[in-house]
Image (spheres, grey):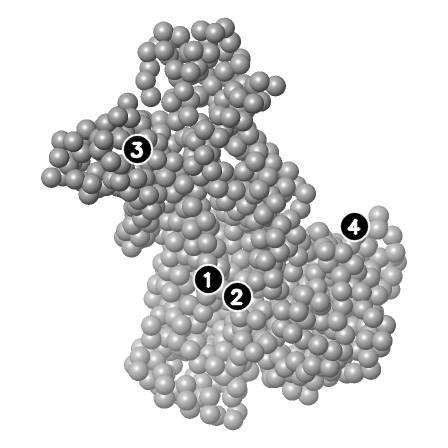
Amino acid sequence: MHLIKLIFRNTLRHKLRTGLTMVGLVVAILSFGLLQTVVDAWYAGAEGAAPDRLITRNAVSLMVPLPLHYREKIRSVDGVKAVAAANWFAGVYQDPKNFFPQFAVEPAYFSMFPEYRIPDAQFRAFFRDRQGALVGRKLAQTYGFRVGDVVPLKGTIFPGTWTFVVRGIYDGADAKTDTSQFFFHWDYLNETVKARTPALANRIGIFIVQIADVDRAAEVSEEVDALFRNSPAETLTETEKAFQIGFVRQTEAILIAVRIVSFLVIFIILAVMANTMAMTARERRGEYATLKTLGFGGGFLAALIFGESLAIAVIGSLVGVALTFPVAEWFASEMGTLFPVFEVSRETVMLQGACALAVGTAAALFPARRAIRVRIVDGLRAIG
Amino acid sequence: MVIPLRYSLRNLRTRRLTTILTSGGMALVVFVFAAVQMLDTGLRQTLVATGQPDNILVTRRAAGTEISSAIDRAQAAIIELQPEIASGLDTRRLASKEAVVLITLPKRETGVATNVTTRGIGPAGTALRPQLHIVAGRMFRFGTSEIIVGQSIAHRFNGAGVGQYMRFGGREWTVVGIFAAGGSAFDSEVWGDAEQLMQAFRRQTYSSVVARLTEAGALDALAQRLENDPRLTLDVKREREFYEEQSRLMSNFISYLGLTLSVIFSIGAMIGAMITMYAAVANRVGEIGTLRALGFRRAAVLWAFLFEAILLGAVGGIVGIALASLMQLVQISTLNWQSFSELAFSFTLTPRIVLSSFAFALLMGVIGGFLPAVRAARLSIIDALRAI
């Protein structure tokens, strides 16, 4: 009990120093948490993938299209429940800065993605309107889209200006669902392209394949690809998760850099914290000697120093963790659709805590060792 | 009267551990600050080196990238015959009609499937890019399934050595040479004959037309004529501008993220400096009193302590920049979001980055040391002398 009281009093002896150290810790723990969340957000697409969905694309690369008639052939493969074509549209809304994903999809698409929650009336309205579009909640909030709004997009892959009418706004089943997307009818895309640029018609970016049995994913993928082997457009079929991770891994270098940097800030704060503890212990050498004279052992001194260091680290990190949530929310709303899913995960919070404990412990190591070793005579002789 | 600089220097030396820890924190911040700028500079230099100043690049209107662009043969022929396009030694126009396709290749070390730009060029393609030369093997022959690969590709991908084969578009392609392109984006590309690539991929259209202008100033007239031609829906840009735009998204991302992080991290380091300097002042109250009693003015005391903080920053700055300069050995390869393909670039250190990083370090020292120095200067002589 005395120990805890002593630690508490010691912590408050240099209010300015303790306060500054804690502010530093708060900043470090907060930025560490945000950086980890940024990395998580990158993987969010893969996290939201369902095991019963496969993606079939051209084996050469995603940018090379597949012929339309593949759809029926894929559907005939045993174990395939449904197939839907989707095309990446890459239109520009007002300014290239306003990036959000746009897909032209077939009706079957929505039954494969039950995580998109659309009110029935809006869904029917979408089907009745050839130029109709379904937009995600987050996207709608970012650009202020409401049902009935007309949204013009300038095509980059498919030339010309395209107008769509928002017919519905979908919500996600949970926070991990991407609600920053824009969907419209594949038929509308194809018919318009036939009239404007016939060379681009009847071409599919990807097929989404729903399978009946999750355990047969590898087998079905193999069978689909075997159908088109040695044809002019060979396919590559993989699970949705593998497909999404494939995207992320190409920008891996940047992710690794962000990870490294997020640990650098922990080292920066470790240096600050260690400095604080070293100075504190140096100033109290006389006291430690006095305590030793009174019969307190090295263990007690070490407990004093570790206790103080950990107390500062724990309080600082608690504030830091508590601040992470509102700041992350603010950051996500500022970034709009750039990070469709931006959620502070439980692992991040645990990592923050672990880092704070490690910093608190490491910072006390040297001062504690010195305090244990100091000879009473030298300690008593020391001033300031 | 000025307190000798030695006074400040010696104080730092006496408190070695504290000095090392405080400067160490600052060094890490400076490292992040410098490394991010180096990355951004490297990226820009790579893409700027890709474009020649008097080359133009024509894509379909609003396409933005070569991948999403398409120019049919009739349109390409019109562009080639414009009077502003220069002629080569053989009196043919210096214009290359190019087909760009992305292919997926697995990286050698990680096995990650990566998008690689494959560029089919016309006969004038190499003459238009003087930065390009063959470093191993030979140039491919037009009309065959031969290809040459950039040196970044040769280093990072399987099957990209001279004499090896790559399979895409239903054909086997023989790698007959490796080229270096002066650290430009072409180093991360595979080159072959445009007509062969188009056949393999059953394409009817080119992606872009690259051409040399007779003189750099001829662009405006040419662009205006082409853009007003009802047969064409094209964008005409200088090749250099085109590639600068390709790097904009990534470059903005790197510099915004980097700047934000540096500023946030520097708060931590400045707090460290502040703690150190407050302690330095608190421990030396008696000394300060003595100095004042000897006749040194408040300003002199302020300067002595501020200088000590600046020294801390300077040490951190030098160490941080030294660490960052080691990063020049590292090459980063990643997906460029705009062109959607692999791009390799290195950390590039310039004198400007050295200067700005050092100034940043000194600034951290000044901000961290200012309040403590003010406190030291404001101590009254009598209280200070009594403090022991």
Residue B146, compared with residue A157, is above or below; it is above
Q: Which amino acid does label 2 sit on?
A: Gln
Residue at mark 1 shares a chain with residue at mark 3: yes
Q: Mark 2 lies on which chain?
A: B
Q: Name the residue under label 3.
A: B281
Q: In front here: B13 or B190?
A: B13
Which mark is first along the chain, 2 or 1?
A: 1
- Mark 2 and mark 4: Cα distance apart in space: 32 Å
- Mark 3 and mark 2: Cα distance apart in space: 54 Å
Callout 3 crowding tier (Cα within 10 Å): few <14, some 14–19, many ≥20:
many
Q: Name the residue under label 2.
A: B338
- Mark 1 and mark 2: Cα distance apart in space: 12 Å
Which part of the image, by quadrant, shows the C terminus of chain B? top left
Q: Which element type, helix, strand or loop, lies under badge 1?
A: helix
Q: In front here: A151 or B159?
A: A151
Q: In this view, does A111 lie to the left or right of B319?
A: right
Which mark is first along the chain, 3 or 1?
A: 1
- Mark 1 and mark 3: Cα distance apart in space: 42 Å
Q: Where is residue B223 in the image (x, y as percent from the top left)?
A: 41, 85
- Mark 1 and mark 4: Cα distance apart in space: 40 Å
Residue at mark 3 shares a chain with residue at mark 2: yes
What residue is rendered at 41% in x and 30% in y?
A: A275
Q: Is residue B148 left or right of residue A34?
A: left
What residue is rendered at 53% in x and 13% in y?
A: A299
Whether residue A331 is visible here, answered yes or no, is yes
Q: Mark 4 points at which residue?
A: A218
Residue at mark 1 shares a chain with residue at mark 2: yes
Q: Mark 1 points at which residue?
A: B252
